[in-house]
Amino acid sequence: MKGGPDADASGAEPISMQSKVLSLELLLSVVEHAGPAFRRGPRFVGAVRQYLCVSLLKNCTSHVTHVVALSLRLFVALVDGFRGRLKSEVEVFISHIFLRILDSGNSTHEHKLLVLEVFHRLCNDVDGLVELFLSYDADFDSIDIFRHIVVALARVVKGPSDKPGAAETATEQGKGAARNDAALRRLALSGLVTTLTSLARACDVDAGDAGTETGDDDVETRGEGPEPPSLARASSSQPRLAPPPPETTTSSAPTSPRAAPPPSGESAKRVEAFDRKRQLQEDLKDGILKFNLKPAHGLKALSSKGHVDDKDPSSVAAFLLKHAAELDKTVVGDYLGKEETYKDGFCVKVLKEYAEQLDFKGLEFDIAIRLYLSGFRLPGEAQKIDRIMENYAARYCTQNPAVFPSADVAFVLAFSVIMLQTDLHNPAIKEEKKMTKDGFRRNNRGISDGKDLDGDFLDEIFDRIKEAPITLAEDDRLRQDKEEAEARSAGNLASSMAAAFGLPGGATPGKRRAEAFVKEREAMVKASVAVLRRGRPAFAAFPAAPKMFEVAWGPALSAFSHALERLYHGPRPTALALRGLRVSACLAAALGLEVACRSLVNALASFTALHGPPKPLLPRHAAAVEALLGLAATRDCAEHLGAAWLPVLRVASKVAHLRLLAQGARTDDAYFGAAEGAQPDSRQARLDFAERRSREEENARALAAHSTLTDASLDALYARSTKLSAVGVEHFVTQLCAVSAAELSTGDALDLGASYVLDEEDLRPGGRYDDAEGSASAALPPLGAPRRPRVAALQRLVDVADANVHTRPRLAWDRMWRVLAAHFARAGAHANTEIAVYAVDSLRQLSLKFLAKEELKAFTFQRAFLKPFERVFRANGGGAERANVREYVVTCLDVLVQARASKIKSGWRSILHVLGNAARDREPAVAKAGFDATSRILDDHLALVAPDFVDVVTTVVAFAAAPSGSETIALEAIARLDACAKALADGTVRAAATAAARLDQEANPEAVVPGDGAQLELWWPLLLGLAQRVADARPGVRNGSLKTLRRVLERDCGAFTPETWRLVFRGVLFPSLESAWTDDAPRPGSSRPTDPPPPMPANGSWLDTTAPGVLDACVALYAARGGGRENTPLLSEMLALLGDCVCQDAEALARLAVAALQRTLASLGSLDPPAPTETWDVACHGLAHLVERALPPYLDAYLRPDPRSEDAARPAPADVAARLDKAPTLARLVASLRLLPLCGRLLASATT
């Protein structure tokens, strides 16, 4: 036969060993080719469970490697063919054999390699892996098989053997051990990657090329030298392990996608069971931790979670026994030894129950003591030891009544055994003073009711205690590890000396390990057979891959990180670790595990060596860069990366920078200098920058040599943003904005000193940074001002926005642009004006492309898109040093208008708001640029901007009031208002606005088309703006405004209704006279009321230059309305206004008002149509009232004494004259004297 037993078996019954091998090969062939009848027949399944599995338990731990390999291969075949019926058997093999072989320090490398290969094959079977998880990890009464496999693989990767030193590698034995360790790590890494790949297939997650099947090259990764054994080569007469036949329903081919899940209700129950178990385990772990610190607190916490009843001694004792491995043995021993006064003797009751729950039946006395003391450490106080051993003695005698005549005898002997243990194994006691058998007999003489115990019985106890001390398992492991370390050190020294002197080296350490493993093997088989007899229910198969990944990603991350940190592992483990990290990141992203995703991606980014100060870039770092950027090329991963995009985009930006250096191209710092006013670099800073740049150039060359990345691949990373969903691209853009903010603030995209991510909630409507009209939004956080800023990510934002602007639905684009707009607004307010101008220019580029598409009816996306221009303009306001940025904003908007005017709809409002802000700018250049842009809009696109005519007028009025000191702009703006009035009057504006409103109504039936009554809404801002300019401090501006206002009213407002004219007089013309009351320019007064008015000084005051024109305009406009009855209320208001001007203390205004009143009353006789009776009544009543108001009080009393007064005598003329000399009444006296002739003329006109 081909193949045979290993050389190790050649000297030990070769015929018997060959028969065993042949039997295993035949069994393997039978199981692999078994049909459905064999797999499902109860008799055959019973034979497999009762005979074959028990036999395999023994052969799996054989010292013959060939037998172990065949046995493990046979186990894999059983799992594939009989998995649904061998639940307990699989648990026994994995938990009691395979995991213990991996954890054992005495098992051989060949055994461990074969076990790892079994795990590799199990993990490559998707359905089988899921079934393992659901049958054990989701079962509270079972151990976590899947978790233990993953942790075991990770532990092998992080094995205790570190990088071998020179002394160890100097010998062939040391080199072989190093190769074996490397092979173990590689195979364990491959197993972890296979596990994650299987989970990706089970979840139907696209992990890119990292998710491809791991082939045999991965499984059989070997080091140099002789090939270690493999399951595939265990029998050269047999083919490699193949998938089970098609009729098998409990498994599927590893490469096929996971089958459709069963009913969701059952799946939910399974997942809920796992969640409940995990929560209970966490509660239990927390309670045990508290117990180890303070037992009372721990039991209380465990009782609150239902794990134990802290009031029931039996429940507490059962808990101590069940969880003895996790509990602190010293704390347990101290708790059990508490005195009766502690908590009313509760601990004493627990101790009694603890002993009662142990089974000592049929055990030797000292062996029973070992079992009793295996769960706690004896306290040091003699009284506590007495109580503990007394309960032991009572329980032992109860179960073994024939051994001792009474429990007192057992108690005394037990205490004596403890003393013997201390005496024999205390290193402080010298050898010659240690107890002997005779001494042990003497100590126990007469303890059995005055008689001696059997001598042989005592001698056997003595021999067993001397050979193996009574110790705890953890103490044994620590001592064993220490002895192995000492032996290994001595063996290495001996081997080195033997090699140096040409002497044969001994294999003492290897033999010791083999002997120790024989003992372990016997214990494993014995325990496994016992568990195997109990059995378990069949497997359950329900989808649980997401929960499995939650269990696996932590240990996998730890193992992959360990592998990447060890240079001596070589390129193969590095490639496996990177692939595992990439698959894990894809799974975490697709399953929505945010913490896991960010941890995995950050770990992958940290291994690129691009963070922090530059350091040499090695091939593994370049591979990590490719793996990290490859996440963006994986559909499921890229879509759900979320906040984990940040490290990916940071590294992408850094790689782009290094590629520029490698190509010898100019970087951003060659185009953008430091901000104005920044201090120059110190000499040390220049030296540091030169050193950093030199290291970056070295890394750039290394990256180009070790990586296949190209500019096209980097471009594709951003171009693929069009494939993301609306939510995915929003996360992508948010993190890219954070990278750009870091570059603009520090000059380095990888700066981790601050977070530059704006919270999405703050940017949404109503959020903290929402810039909606009428909202009091907070200012965006400013960016830093580095000496060497970078704009690479900012340009990438332009590319991403450009690629998505025409492919996204408008609502999706609106969410995306909300983030982009805030960032461009921040960049436009950068302390470095060159950066700010660059950001504005980027906005201009995007706006040109965005406005190339027609805006849908009833939408306002353009307004939101152009909002950043408003923010940038406001953020750069206030000083002359930022005037160039503001001017460039206006210039960009002017370019947009000239290029895309026909496409602009809702965007006009944002454009006009910026131009209005430019009008209020104190820098003449900014105001001039804004006015030129506004003029071009009015000249070329008035019909297009007609729907926003009110905003147009508001903007032009702002230029008329421009504070920049340019009267020329103000006069030109007034002329533009005149032209706007003409367009409004001739119907050009109104027709365009109505047409636009009708289009909106088609899209939105609730929209209202403005009717004829809405004309005042268009006229009012124009008229009010002109009226406000009548009060301008510049004489030329106010006179020009007054002329234009009068001309517009006379020429274009003839269609106003009487009610509208009343509003115009009341809200536009009359308020214009308010400046007369506030004009405090000095002017001379008349000495006598009958004197003519004194000449006015040429000081250009408002009262002297503008007030006559205002009053004349009011009179003329009233006279032009005609004498219709509907105009009578307007006359009443005119007389009231003129009366207020007359009855005040400014003589010049009073004289002007009297003259205006005279012209008003004179016009009543020439109205067309003639004034009705009601008009004359109003005129007479108003004039009479005015005369009465205008007469000074003392003169009125003199002329009209009160007849009801008893002393109706008039005051003396001298008293009246003295009172009239006072200045405040002089103007009223002058007015009253002038009004008397008016009364006569009014009466004459009324009678005729």
Image (spheres, grey):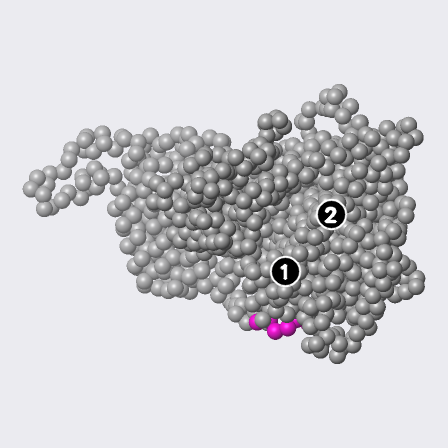
- At 9% from the left edge and 46% from the top edge, which residue is drawn? 1204
The quadrant in which the C terminus is found is bottom left
Q: CA distance from mark 2 to mark 1?
A: 20 Å
Dot 2, crowdedness within 10 Å: few (<14), some or many (≥20)? many
- At 52% from the left edge and 35% from the top edge, which residue is drawn? 442
In this orientation, which residue lies closer to the viewer: 546 or 1013? 546
- At 71% from the left edge and 31% from the top edge, which residue is drawn? 787
In this orientation, which residue lies closer to the viewer: 260 or 631? 260
Dot 1, crowdedness within 10 Å: few (<14), some or many (≥20)? few
Location of residue 191 by image quarter = bottom right
Look at the image and tell me whether residue 604 can be seen: no
Against 43, residue 392 (above or below) is above
In this orientation, which residue lies closer to the viewer: 388 or 209? 388
Question: Which stretch is magenta?
Answer: 259-265
What numbered label is drawn on residue 517? 2
Determine whether the residue tagged by mark 1 lies in a helix, strand or loop.
helix
The x and y percentages for residue 1135 are 35, 51
Determine whether the residue tagged by mark 2 lies in a helix, strand or loop.
helix
Q: Amino acid at mark 2?
A: Phe
- At 78% from the left edge and 66% from the top edge, which residue is drawn? 77
Q: Amino acid at mark 1?
A: Ala
The reply to whether the magenta stretch includes residue 264 is: yes
On the picture, is 147 further left or further right than 560? Answer: left
Q: Which residue is mark 1?
A: 530
The quadrant in which the N terminus is found is bottom right
Location of residue 849 by image quarter = bottom right
The x and y percentages for residue 275 are 56, 59
The x and y percentages for residue 42 are 69, 77
Look at the image and tell me whether residue 140 can be seen: yes
* Mark 2 or mark 1: whose residue is earlier in sequence: 2
The x and y percentages for residue 991 are 60, 65
